[in-house]
Each structure stands twice: as C-alpha cells, then as structure tokens.
Image (cartoon, rainbow, N blue to C red):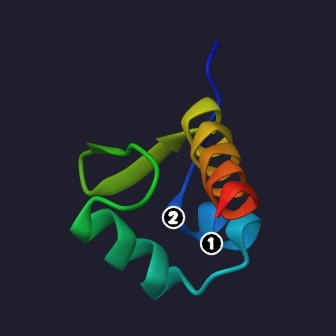
Amino acid sequence: MTKYMTTAEVAEVSRAPIETVRYWRHIGKGPKSFKVGRRVLYAVDDVEAWLDAARQTSITA
C-alpha cells in the first residue's frame, strides 16, 4: 500500500517552509499532489522522485 505525506511532512523532508511547498504546488514546481476533501496529499514515491530529480539537476548544473 502506498504511503502518503502531508504538506507539512514534505516541508520537513525538503527543509523548506510550508508556505514554500504550497507555492511550489501552485506553480507546478513541487512533487505531484492530489486532494482528498480539503487535504493535500503527496505519495512518498513521488516526493522521493522529485527530490532525486532536483539532486540530479543540481549535480549536473
């Protein structure tokens, strides 16, 4: 079964303010997300893939 994270948990993992994670979601820069009612959730696999992609981009840049 897939595990999910909240916006606050993504902020903690990425060491960014919650507001920044919300902004990334708004502009389409952050990990894939979806809403269940009013709650925004992120699949752990998507967050890890997003972080890996960001790491690869910074290594090659």
Identify the mark at residue 54; answer none if there is no mark.
none
The amino acid marked with disc number 2 is Thr
Residue drawn where x is 75% and y is 58% of the image: 59
Quarter of the figure that contains the N terminus: top right
Question: Where, by quadrant of the figure, is residue 60 drawn?
Answer: bottom right
Of 51 and 55, nearer the camera is 55
- Mark 1 falls on what kind of element? helix
Between the residue at mark 2 and the residue at mark 1, the CA separation in whole angstroms equals: 6 Å
Residue 19 higher or lower than 12, as above or below: below
Q: Position of residue 13 (x, y in %)?
A: 74, 64
Answer with left or right where residue 32 lies relative to residue 60.
Answer: left
As helix, strand or loop, the secondary structure at mark 2 comes to helix
Identify the residue at horizontal 58%, vertical 87% (top origin): 17
Residue shown at 57%/46% (left/top)?
A: 50
User: Which quadrant holds the C terminus?
Assistant: bottom right
The front one of 1 and 26 is 26
Residue type at numbered disc 1: Ala
Please tell me whether residue 8 is drawn above or below residue 19 in the rendered image.
above
Q: Nearer the viewer, residue 11 or 55?
A: 55
